[in-house]
Each structure stands twice: as C-alpha cells, then as structure tokens.
Image (spheres, rainbow, N blue to C red):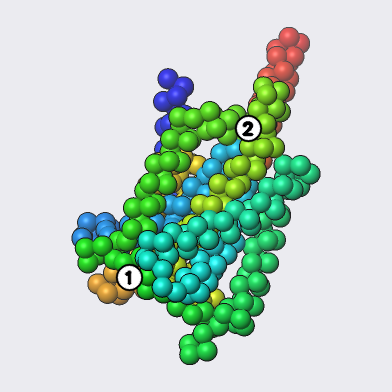
Amino acid sequence: MKAFENKFRSLLGLVIPILAAFIIGAILIIFIGENPFLTYKIMIEKSLFSASGITKTLHFASPLILTGLAIAITFKANIFNMGVEGAAVLGGFFACVTGFSLKGLPPMIHISLCLLTGMITGMIFCLIPALLKAYFKVDEMVVTLMLNYVVVELVKYLAQGIYRDPSSGYVATYSISENAMFSKLFGTDITMFFLITLIIFAIIYVVFNKTKFGYEITVIGKNPEFAEAMGMKVSKNIIRMMLISGALSGLAGAGYLMSEKYRFTLDFSGNPGLGWDGMLIALLGNHNPVGVLVSSIFYAALKTGSEYIGIYTNVPKDIVSIIQGILILFLSVKFINERINFSGKIRSKMAKVELKQLGGNSNESIK
C-alpha cells in the first residue's frame, strides 16, 4: 500500500507542474485573443500524431534522453552534477574537430571515433569535480557550475581562432566530413543516433534496476554514511557515477552535432542548452530512466509543436518557451524542496505549534 502511495505521489509531482504550466499558458493565449484548446490540439497532433511530427520529435528527443539520464544517475545518488551542459558542449566540439580533421575513413569507423571522442571528453570534464567531491568533500554543484563558464570561454576561443572556417559568414568551425555524419533513415528525421540512444537507455535501465551498482546508487543517495558502514566504497562509486554522467553528456553533444548541426557554432547547444534541458527532464521524470524517456519525448514534442503553432494559428511560438519557463519554475521549487526539505520543516514546526496549543488547552481544562 505504501509503495502504491509513493508512486501516486510521484505521479502527482509530475502531472501537477505540467497542468499548472499549461493552464497559465492557456490564460496567456486567451489574452492574445486565440483559442487555447485549438492551439494545444494543433501542437499535440502535429508533434505526436503525424508521421513527420513524431519522427522529428524523436529526433530532437535523442540528446535530451542522454542528458536527462546523465543528470538522473547522479541526482539519484544525491550528487548534483550541474556540469552536464559543459560536458555536452565540450563533447560536441571535440567530436566536431575529430569529424573534420580525419579524412578518408570508412563511415562506421569515423562515426565511432567521433562518438568516442565526445564520450572521453565528457568523462575528462566530469573527472575534476568527481575527484574533488570524492576525496576532498568539495561541493560538486559549485565546481561544475563554474566549469561550465570555463567551457564557454574555451570553445569560444578555439572556434573563433584555431578551428574557425574562414569561408563562413559567422563564427563556426569547419563542417565535419560526410563520412562522420549520421544520415537520415527512410526519408525521415530519425538517424542511427536515435537507435544508439535507445540502446544506451536500455543499458542504464538495467543498471538502475537490476544490478548491485544500481542498488548502491540508491543507498548512497539515501544515506552515504550507512553505505560506507556497509562496506560500499562511496568515493569510488561517486567517481564512477560522475564518469558515466560525463560519458552520457559527451555522447549527447557529439550525437547532436553529427545528426543535426554538422559544425560547431557558438549557439550549438541552443537556449537554455542541452544540459539545462536535461536537468528539467530529470526532475520531470523523477530521476527514473523510464520517466526520463517519457519526459524527453514530451519536452521535444513541445519544441516540434511550437513550429506548427506559428503556421496554423496567430499564437507566437514563443508561448511554448513561456510554458517551458513556467515548468522550470515549478520544478525548481520541487528540486529546492527535495534538497532542503522545506515542506517537511514547515510541517514539523506546525506540529510543534499544535502540540503546544493542545498542551495549553489541557492545562486550562485541568484548572
């Protein structure tokens, strides 16, 4: 019964922020003078229930699934890796360098090398905060947030200087070789990158739910002191989790570049970015692999649907950005509450006040 109650609360935690965001979005659409039901109907139908829409949605969901999993695997252990954005950008950049630097390789080998480069780069990026957290107890949230800014300046310097394509009219690297590009499958937007993402998802799902390592992640997240006392090597597992997170992030950046961008630009990761979107998705999916998968498709559907809104209605597609922003706000509150247990502290204080009142009433009745 308790398990059912926990699942129900988890479901409510997912549904309520989404409903609230859409209700506020509907109010704004009404103020514009448009029909919110028609707007949402077009957005959902075109992004999820049409052949071109669903393939485009799944294509955009591919890197988000990976960044969502990258954050979920660390959040599950109560480790707050805010460097997924930096790892994804860095992985995409150096996968791009590998993509245009190597010539004459067979497509399978070239694509594999680019993906491997992205993963290794992401792992190296996450190794720094992992070691600081594991052996020196340095707050990983602060370190990873600061490293994101280092990455921004580093790739900007390299993209504007050494690796800039002089024939481009804007700041961009050379385009990757055709042999390093993921080709579209069956005339749709889906590429092999989406299939690779599904394989990675299946592996992470098994690791989370069926292995000793997955069990240790859960225990470390709930009580690291108990985990250490039970013989689990917490420091070693922290490093391992951060390396997996970095590999997933770097793979997301590399795959996105090879299936969508084909060259690195300063706006490569978009706004707010693959990593920050992944954080929202992990929170929305309650740090569960299946939840991350569903949330990624939902989030990508919003992006795909926004393009159709501008075509079929007079509602600006920016309304989707507003909905996403409201969703981020609600989920941020949820995240902060999970971190400091704000609602639990309020309930505890209220209970103490009630006990005092009951004590006062009982004293008065005795008198």
Asked if 142 appears above or below 313 in the picture, the reply is above
Q: Which mark is residue 220?
A: 2
The one of 210 and 366 positioned closer to us in this rendering: 210
Residue appearing at x 53%, y 56% in the figure: 119
Q: Amino acid at mark 1?
A: Glu
The one of 259 and 115 positioned closer to us in this rendering: 115
Q: Amino acid at mark 2?
A: Ile
Residue appearing at x 73%, y 20% in the figure: 360
Q: Secondary structure at mark 2?
A: helix
- Count of residue discs: 2
Circle 1 sits on which residue?
A: 307
Q: Is residue 8 visible?
A: yes
CA–CA distance in space, label 2 to label 1: 43 Å
Q: Is residue 321 visible?
A: no
Which class describes the residues within 10 Å of circle 2: few (<14), some (14-19), or many (20+)? many
- Give the image location of residue 320, x and y in percent: 40, 64
Q: Is residue 325 left or right of residue 131?
A: left
Q: Secondary structure at mark 1?
A: helix
